[in-house]
Image (cartoon, grey):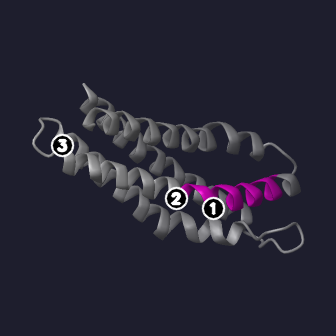
Amino acid sequence: MLNALEVLTTVVVGVMVGVEFSVAFVINPIVARLPDDSTLLARAHGGRMLGAVMPVWYLTSLALVAVWAIAGWRHDDAGLVVTAGALLIVSVIMSVLLLVPINNRGKTWTPENRPADWKQQAQRWDRFHYIRVAVIIGAFALLAAALT
């Protein structure tokens, strides 16, 4: 049963990392090359869509890692799993404190109501997101190492 939990957790976290990686290095660079109004609308839509899904995914990932850490406490890889969980906690804290406030503003923007500094706010979100992606890649790598 523990093996199934380990694999499920690693897959769930790995797919989440893939989505966040693609947002950072594929989707947002494509969207940034669109005309300003299209960029704004695409980012606002993405913020609404992913803003609804990703919190559940992050918390589910964290819960699965916590269950794995507890269930596998006596195994040699427990330290890797606990460290991965700590990194996921860091990513959730970053999200709540740094990324969500920008996202909550941005998802309501239209060409008619956008603030003058909307591009700077989007770039700030992107910079924080790059850091968050690095953090969750670290968590995923630790979970993958714990599988061996």
Residue type (three-letter) at the residue carrying disc 1: Ala
Which residue, given by chain and number where applicable, does mark 1 sit on? 52
Which residue, given by chain and number where applicable, does mark 3 sit on? 72
Q: Please tell me the numbered disc located at residue 66.
A: none
Give the image location of residue 105, x and y in percent. Answer: 68, 72
Which residue, given by chain and number where applicable, does mark 2 sit on? 56
Residue type (three-letter) at the residue carrying disc 3: Gly
* Magenta-colored segment: predominant secondary structure: helix
- At 67% across and 62% down in the image, what residue appears? 120
If you read the primary sequence from the N terminus, does the residue marked by circle 2 or circle 3 appear first? 2
The residue tagged with tag 1: helix, strand or loop?
A: helix
Is 75 within the magenta? no
Q: CA distance from mark 1 to mark 2?
A: 8 Å
Left or right placement of residue 77 versus residue 16 in this view: left
Is 45 within the magenta? yes
Within-10-Å neighbours for mark 2: few <14, some 14–19, many 20+: few
The residue closer to the viewer here, 138 or 2, is 2
Residue type (three-letter) at the residue carrying disc 2: Val
Residues at discs 2 and 3 in contact (Cβ within 8 Å): no
Q: CA distance from mark 2 to mark 3?
A: 24 Å
Q: CA distance from mark 1 to mark 3?
A: 31 Å
Q: Nearer the viewer, mark 1 or mark 3?
A: 3
Please state the extent of the stretch shown in magenta in the rendering.
39-55
